Amino acid sequence: MNREIPVPRYYQIVHQLEKFIQENDCGPGEKLPSEKELEVTFGVSRITARRALEQMERRGLITKRRGKGTYVAKRWEKSDFPKFTGSIDGLFMIGRGGVVKEATMEEVPATQRIKEVLGLPDPIASVVRIQRVLLLHGQPYAYHQNFYPTWIGEKIRREDLYEYPLLEILEKKLHMPVLKVDQVIEATLADTEIANSLGISFGAPLLYVERTLTGKKDMPVGFTQTYYRGDGYCLSVTLVRTDMRGLKGWRPPAPPS
């Protein structure tokens, strides 16, 4: 039980039980710890332990038998969600083959951070926000949230959101070339909205990428936040020994000539 992270204790118990069922290949009917045992093991209240089991019962993962205990309801189904291995740019390219499951576009109040990122003066109170959920092999894999100054956002057609990547809409539809991209990559956890959109559990790990798009005359033209399922990406790098000026280090191998 990690009390330092902003994830509810009941969900941490759910996560540990799911991990136990998966790693031990528990089948239907196998017994799990009781509320009392969870209370002692994790140092939580009976209410917290009960809420964790109720959460799993609602999802059909366990059954509770009065006076007998808690049991696995069904065998864990291993996800066949594809795992991408390579550079982060490779993940973006794979995204071009994704299918848009749902898309929304609306004018919303601009937060102070959005104003700063897009270089908007304080009197400007709103921006256009576009939210999209992308599918790959029939499963949600990315949640996109884009912000544009209203003078750009109002030119984007809703029907194009289902047909083209937003970068392509900017450059080919609106004729606004993007000349520079500032990118930040972090690990984060799924909140309720993103978890529901991607079909994952609250607090599940995510790969978070934010990008600031800059056009001509060093003018910001968009700000993008993308959340990728953590079980769908793996960075794999090969390094070889190098000896430069007596200092041994590591570097990627040279490309074939």
Image (spheres, rainbow, N blue to C red):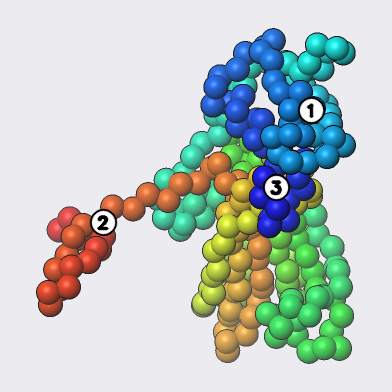
Tag 3 and tag 1, C-beta contact below 8 Å: no
Q: Is residue 54 shown above or below 196?
A: above
Distance of label 3 from label 1 (alpha carbons): 24 Å
Horizontally, residue 127 falls left or right of residue 160, namely right
Tag 1 and tag 2, C-beta contact below 8 Å: no
Q: Nearer the viewer, mark 3 or mark 1?
A: 1
**Residue beneath disc 3:** 203
Is residue 205 or residue 106 the one in the foreground?
205
Q: Which is more N-terminal, label 3 or label 2?
A: 3
Residue 90, image x, y percentages: 44, 53
Question: Badge 1: how crowded within 10 Å, few (<14), some, or many (20+)?
Answer: few
Residue 20, image x, y percentages: 60, 28
Question: Badge 2: how crowded within 10 Å, few (<14), some, or many (20+)?
Answer: few
Q: Is residue 153 shown above or below 22?
A: below
Is residue 106 or residue 70 the one in the foreground?
70
Amino acid type, residue under disc 1 in the picture: Lys
Horizontally, residue 145 falls left or right of residue 236, namely right
Q: Which mark is residue 36?
A: 1
Residue at x 59%, y 69% (from the top left corner): 211
Residue at x 51%, y 36% (from the top left corner): 82
**Residue beneath disc 2:** 239
Amino acid type, residue under disc 3 in the picture: Gly
| Quarter of the C terminus within the rendering | bottom left
